[in-house]
Amino acid sequence: MSSKQIYQEVILDHCKKPRNWGMVSKPTHKAEGINPLCGDHLWVSMTVVDETIEDIQYEGESCAICMASGSMMTMKVKGKAFTDVMALTEQFRSLTTGPSEADGAKELGSLTVFSGIRDLPSRVKCAMLPWHTLTAAINSKEEASTEGDQDPVPGSGTQKT
Amino acid sequence: MGKAMRNDTVVKYDVERIRRDFPVLSTSVNDNPLVYLDSGASSQMPQSVIDRINHYHQYEHANIHRGVYQLSEQATTAYEEVRTTVARFLNVPDSAEIIFTKGTTHAINLVAHAYGRKFVRAGDEIIVSHMEHHSNIVPWQQLCEEVGATLKVIPISDVGELDLEVYEGLLSEKTKMVAVTHVSNVLGTINPIRDMVALAHAKDIPVLVDGAQGAPHMKVDVQDLDCDFYIFSGHKVCGPTGIGVLYGKRDWLERMDPFEGGGDMILSVTFEKTTYADIPAKFEAGTPPIVSALGLGKAIDYLESIGLDSIELHEKVLTKYAMDALTDIEDITFYGTAPNKAGVISFNIKGVHAHDIGTLLNDDGVAVRTGHHCAQPIMQRYKVPATTRASFYLYNTVDDVDKLVVAIRKAQKIFS
Ligand SMILES: Cc1ncc(COP(=O)(O)O)c(C=O)c1O
């Protein structure tokens, strides 16, 4: 599959200048995410008031797809209630893994640039990792991993930190 | 080898003819001809191997060592002939010292169990190197945990060579095994196995060599190396998956207990006691991957028809060419630049994650491996999360390298 769909201006821009980069100063929620296939490793930290994300930042070391996904995710979910965030996460998941007709819910907005990723099954995890980590942070589990996911390309090695 | 002779060999090596033997090499990816640079993971199969496999499935399929009818006897003979082929391939005089396994990983686990559980005790030590594949780390780690032994690690230098002084210092009366790779699957370093074996043997310590990246690329003579175990996988020597080889010295194999129990590995079974078959059957419980073994036999025939020395030389020339061409790329960092290096080149491009390089190269039909290559300790040593790896084999060309370079520059431009 060609990757032309995915390495577009928007994604490259977010990759080079990630938004909301860093760690919020007094996080109420945070989690660490790892993708053993890529070696992607990131942290999501948030200040949450009444189940609403007041502030969110992320940082780490990752491939462009993960980086851009994380950057755009933080912009999207800042100020949103947990329930809305969880719905968005589901929409993003079906955008990246669903049938090709599904072009994504309107709510996803600019995140629909990730629809091309479904043609690159080995890279779906990269796009999903920030979202997994966000879910882990919401549940305040310490660590998210893409390992539990159904892996379209298994056998990439295993890792537990 | 003299210079004149070297040139001579290069001229005679007809890579285009070799390429025609591999059907997959004339296919396309994303409308570009496939440039296959991942033979370090799995090599491709020539038509003769594919034909052998098909023929068995069409006309020869039967279990071995079990029937008195013709089909079974033929399959048994064919399977046992491959054992002789493999023995010749590694220069083993006694083909009973060749054990068929599912692959390198399976073979290392076999030794870690059958040797380890018998000879390794609490307080003992096992030596591995910092450049091992996970499959030559984890089985030893499991053994150590189980019996209370300790894993010791030979460090590597910045260019990717083992520190032999430290190695020598690690060898002691506590050491019960040295398990080391012949060639690193990430750094390409060819380790001085003969010297390492001599040092270990001076203290009566056996040595296991992970030859997964060695046997495919150079003539291996286990008598010359004098190692106690040598292991490789079929799918990296132009053969199919599902088959691997364990060479072990008779003395060790006889003293070791079986690894797996079942059919074919017994002499007699009662509910009170089972007596085991002699080697090699003792270590081949159950119906083996017969067709994979036949494919492996043909693959070895194929490699030998070209000549392992010629293949090695071809890869050396290509690797030198590739290192020179890649060095011209701005912001490239190599991992593994030892002088004695096989056709494995690991690198990173500043500002572009290896995984993105891999995806973008695929657009141009270039297949490389990206990630940690099942060798996370190497990634930790060089403080990188991942690398891109191009690995060469007998069918790769200067044109492949040129296309790799062009594709990398293109990827770099997208991120600039
Ligand atoms: C050096 C080395 N050792 C061991 C292995 C494992 O081989 P297999 O997966 O065939 O068991 C590999 C292949 O990935 C390797 O490169």
Image (spheres, coloured by chain):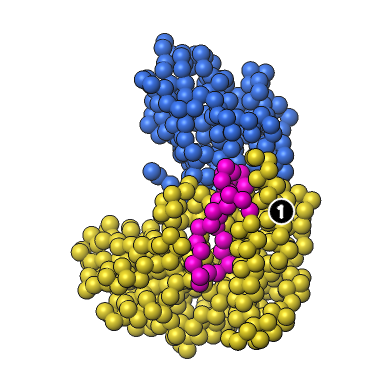
Chain colours: A blue, B yellow
Residue A48 picture quarter: top left
Reply yes or no: does residue B331 show up in magenta.
yes
| Residue range of the region highlighted in magenta in the rendering | B329-357
Residue extending furthest toward the left: B123
Q: Is residue B390 above or below residue B115?
A: above
**Can residue B378 be seen by looking at this rendering?**
yes
Q: Nearer the viewer, residue B299 or A63?
A: A63
Q: Residue at x 68, y 43 (%)?
A: B413
Q: In this view, does B338 lie above or below A124?
A: below
Q: Residue at x 60, y 41 (%)?
A: A123
Q: Position of residue B337 (x, y in %)?
A: 51, 64
Secondary structure type for disc 1: helix
| Quadrant location, the C terminus of chain B | top right
Residue A45 picture quarter: top left
Chain letter of the residue carrying label 1: B
| Quadrant location, the N terminus of chain B | bottom right
**Can residue B239 be seen by looking at this rendering?**
no
Residue extending furthest toward the top: A50
Q: Residues within 10 Å of mark 1 (few under 14, many from 20)?
A: some
Q: Position of residue B307 (x, y in %)?
A: 63, 82
Reply yes or no: does residue B85 show up in magenta.
no
In this picture, residue A141 sits left or right of residue B362: left
Q: Is residue A34 above or below residue B147?
A: above
CB of residue at label 1: within 8 Å of ligand 1? no
Q: Which of B39 and B296 is in front in this view?
A: B39
Q: Which amino acid does label 1 sit on?
A: Val
Q: In this view, does A87 lie above or below B148?
A: above
Q: Residue at x 20, y 64 (%)?
A: B123
Task: Give the residue pinned by disc 1.
Answer: B406
Q: Where is residue B389 in the image (x, y as percent from the top left)?
A: 57, 57
